[in-house]
């Protein structure tokens, strides 16, 4: 049973560029949430996708956008990258997205220079 | 809004001792909490969860206690092992039921 997978593992970009991160949920899960984790901090909720729609959004600017595909996989897009966007980006999957366990992937380490 | 935080940033214990990691929350409407373990370079790993209609829940070597009166929960790890060294986060479910709110974490160091 495959867990949550994310790609790429590491990514280096420069300010102003755009980046796309990918996530495949745990087998059987239909909901994907994205979190940003700065160094030494807890993960911060970006948004959640369910039935291919953004169901809830955290306190992040519109530069952060996402998409969910019919197979439940998801992408996180960040435009006009800032130095402060450097972080570990985590994807978590769950069933129905309600008060149930959220299983996390290994994350994508994004460095913005 | 919800605020979830931990009492201590670091905790050092000897191998074989029991560990207790504490967490306080501010939103009494939160009704679901999860403890995660995060090792260096990895994503958070689910340890145990508890719902607000429970006071205690036990897993393998771990116990979570929830005190709704003082809005406090704790994670107890029995017979701590070197492999338990990691950062531990408590996370509460927001009122919407979708977004987990994390604290900053407690770094547990197990010494031989």
Image (cartoon, coloured by chain):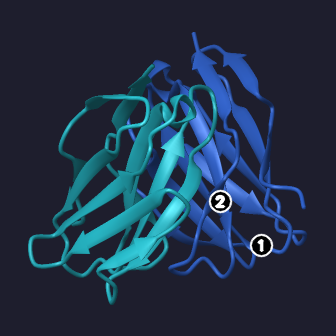
Q: Check disc 1 and report its element: helix, strand or loop.
A: loop
Q: Quadrant of the N terminus of chain B?
A: bottom left
Q: Quadrant of the C terminus of chain B?
A: top left
Q: What tint does the image give chain B?
A: cyan
> In the rendered image, which residue does mark 1 sit on?
A29
Residue at position x 54%, y 48% in the image: A35
Please give the letter of the chain rendered in blue: A
On screen, residue B26 versus residue A9, left or right, reads left
Q: Is residue A40 visible?
A: no
Is B49 or B96 nearer to us in this picture?
A: B49
Q: Position of residue B32 (x, y in %)?
A: 39, 76
> In the rendered image, which residue does mark 2 sit on?
A103
On screen, residue B28 versus residue B40, left or right, reads left
Chain letter of disc 2 in the image: A
Residue at position x 70%, y 47% in the image: A105
Dot 2 and dot 1 residues touching (CB under 8 Å): yes
Vertical relation: A67 (above or below) B38: below
Is B37 or A78 nearer to us in this picture?
A: B37
Residue at position x 90%, y 61% in the image: A1
Q: Position of residue B85 (x, y in %)?
A: 48, 31
On screen, residue B85 versus residue A14, left or right, reads left
Q: Check disc 2 and report its element: helix, strand or loop.
A: strand
Q: Is residue A56 visible?
A: yes
Q: Which mark is residue B73?
A: none
Chain letter of disc 1 in the image: A
């Amino acid at each position: 049973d495959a867990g949550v997978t994310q790609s790429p593992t590491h990514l280096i970009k420069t300010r102003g560029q755009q980046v796309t991160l990918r996530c495949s949920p745990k087998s059987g899960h239909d909901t994907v949430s994205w979190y940003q984790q700065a160094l030494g901090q807890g993960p911060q909720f970006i948004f959640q996708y369910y039935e291919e729609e953004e169901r809830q959004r955290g306190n992040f600017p519109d530069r952060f956008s996402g998409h969910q595909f019919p197979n439940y996989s998801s992408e996180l897009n960040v435009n006009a990258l800032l130095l402060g966007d450097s972080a570990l980006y985590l994807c978590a999957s769950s069933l129905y997205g309600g008060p149930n366990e959220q299983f996390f992937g290994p994350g994508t380490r994004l460095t913005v220079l | 809004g919800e605020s979830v935080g931990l009492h201590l940033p670091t905790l050092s214990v000897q191998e074989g001792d029991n560990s207790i990691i504490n967490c306080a929350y501010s939103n009494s409407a939160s009704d679901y909490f999860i403890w995660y373990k995060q090792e260096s370079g990895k994503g958070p790993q689910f340890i145990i969860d508890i719902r607000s209609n429970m006071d205690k829940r036990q897993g393998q070597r771990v116990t979570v206690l929830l005190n709704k009166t003082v809005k406090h929960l704790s994670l107890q790890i029995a017979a701590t092992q070197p492999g338990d060294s990691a950062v531990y986060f408590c996370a509460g479910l927001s009122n919407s039921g979708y977004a987990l709110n994390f604290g900053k974490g407690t770094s547990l160091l197990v010494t031989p």
